[in-house]
Amino acid sequence: MEFNELKSTWDAVKTPSISAAEIQNMFSENKHPVLKSIRKQFAIEITGWLIFIAFYYSMLDGAEKSIWVNGLLVFSILLPLVHNLMGYRLSKNLIYDDTIYESLTKFQSKVKAYAVVSIVSRQIYLLGLLTFLTYGINIHANASISLVIIGIFFIVQLVALYMIWKRRLQSLGNTIASFS
């Protein structure tokens, strides 16, 4: 296809006319498909954790455990919910400045902070849950082997999360570098 033919084909394509109000409506929080799926996931997680918190006291012998262990469990469950709320707010507000470069630079610093919160909250959640479940039990040889395996799992997960976030931040950094 020659250039003139390509140009005439391009000019023949009708651009759909969308009013400014329709465009603004597409960007509204309630209509945005990514934010809608994040809200749906958040609602499911909140419902599940509230059910768990409502029944853990009797089902998992929370009444027999000390108050600090119960508090640690509740805190470690609330931490991922706060993490998800931070992720929602981060996804909701993507424009931080006038230019794309400045906006992406500010977004990168917010993503770095979010990455730290993500890794730390996941580890605190797992440690809190493990502490609750193992509190007050006698540790024998088989149980200590299991705890070592769980500890190795924590370390592997910590390294995996770090590598995932490092890759994401490098990709964002490469995008920002392409603007300069």
Image (spheres, helix red, strand yellow):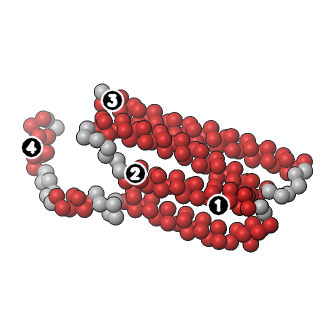
Displayed quadrant of residue 62: bottom right
Cβ atoms under marks 1 and 4 closer than 8 Å: no
**Secondary structure beneath label 4:** helix
Q: Position of residue 63 (x, y in %)?
A: 76, 69
**Secondary structure beneath label 2:** helix
Pair 1/3: label in front: 1
Q: Is residue 29 visible?
A: yes
**Secondary structure beneath label 1:** helix
Pair 1/2: label in front: 1
Residue at 39% in and 58% down:
35
Q: Which residue is mark 2?
A: 91
Q: Which residue is mark 1?
A: 74
Seen from the viewer's position, the closer of residues 135 and 48 is 135
Cβ atoms under marks 1 and 3 closer than 8 Å: no
Q: Position of residue 100 (x, y in %)?
A: 28, 38
Q: Which mark is residue 178?
A: 3
Displayed quadrant of residue 175: top left
Whether residue 160 is situated above or below residue 178 in the rendered picture:
below
Q: Is residue 138 left or right of residue 47?
A: right
Q: Mark 2 is on which residue type?
A: Ser
Q: Which residue is mark 4?
A: 8
Crowd band around label 3 with a 10 angstrom C-alpha radius: few (<14), some (14–19), many (20+) = few
Residue at 25% in and 38% down:
99
Q: Is residue 97 left or right of residue 167?
A: left
Cβ atoms under marks 2 and 4 closer than 8 Å: no
Q: Position of residue 6 (x, y in %)?
A: 14, 40
Q: Work out how far the residue at label 3 is from the one at label 4, CA to CA, in angstroms.
A: 32 Å
Pair 3/2: label in front: 2
Q: Work out how far the residue at label 1 is from the one at label 2, CA to CA, in angstroms.
A: 26 Å
